[in-house]
């Protein structure tokens, strides 16, 4: 999958099911602490946020709390802008992520209505193109 390829550019093995399945382990270093922090931020209850923030600080250091909070805030901002303006996924991203979005149940969210459905032929094209994405992502990571 396209999104999985970014982690694999560093040699990581990731399980994106952890995005929507509490029992799955992402394979991301400190992934459980970061997931709990993200979940607490979304729930907006101060006690779980405090506990999650303390866990991230304990496991990763104080600087990681600031970084994780900044990433969460940025994603929240981007999602709100995209939802408010009705921005769909770019066509290539929609094609290459169709199976992943289906597997994770992402298309059940309201904002998914803004993204055109990918038909069977384009979905097949996306599957066939997946093996090319990893080498391209690795090259891109080296350039950055």
Image (tube, rainbow, N blue to C red):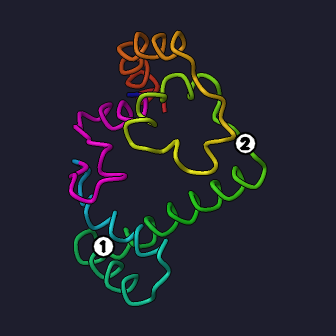
Location of residue 130 by image quarter = top left
> Considering the image in quadrants, where does the N terminus appear?
top left
Which is more N-terminal, label 2 or label 1?
Answer: 1
Identify which residue, 144 or 4, lies in the foreground. 4
User: Percent x, y for residue 39?
Assistant: 40, 69
Residue, x 78% and y 50% (percent of image)?
A: 85
The vertical placement of 6 against 63, above or below, is above
Q: Residue furthest right?
A: 85
Residue, x 72% and y 42% (percent of image)?
A: 87
The vertical placement of 39 against 20, above or below, is below
Secondary structure at badge 1 equals helix
Q: Residues within 10 Å of mark 1 (few under 14, many from 20)?
A: many
Which residue position holds label 1? 56
Report the label total: 2
Q: Nearer the viewer, mark 1 or mark 2?
A: 2
Magenta-tinted stretch? 2-26
The vertical placement of 85 against 76, above or below, is above
8 magenta-colored: yes
Which residue position holds label 2? 87
Secondary structure at badge 2 equals loop
114 magenta-colored: no
User: Percent x, y for residue 69?
Assistant: 48, 69
Identify which residue, 130 or 86, lies in the foreground. 86
Q: Residue furthest bottom?
A: 47
User: Percent x, y for residue 108?
Assistant: 52, 46
């Amino acid at each position: 999958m396209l999104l999985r390829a970014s982690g694999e550019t560093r040699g990581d093995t990731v399980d994106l099911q952890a995005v929507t399945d509490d029992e799955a382990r992402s394979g991301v270093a400190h992934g459980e602490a970061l997931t709990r922090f993200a979940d607490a931020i979304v729930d907006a209850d101060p006690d779980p946020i405090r506990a999650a923030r303390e866990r991230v600080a304990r496991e990763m250091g104080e600087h990681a709390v600031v970084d994780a909070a900044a990433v969460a805030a940025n994603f929240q901002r981007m999602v709100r802008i995209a939802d408010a303006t009705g921005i769909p996924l770019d066509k290539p991203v929609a094609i290459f992520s169709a199976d992943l979005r289906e597997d994770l149940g992402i298309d059940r969210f309201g904002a998914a209505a803004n993204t055109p459905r990918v038909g069977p032929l384009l979905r097949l094209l996306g599957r066939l193109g997946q093996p090319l994405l990893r080498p391209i992502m690795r090259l891109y990571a080296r350039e950055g």
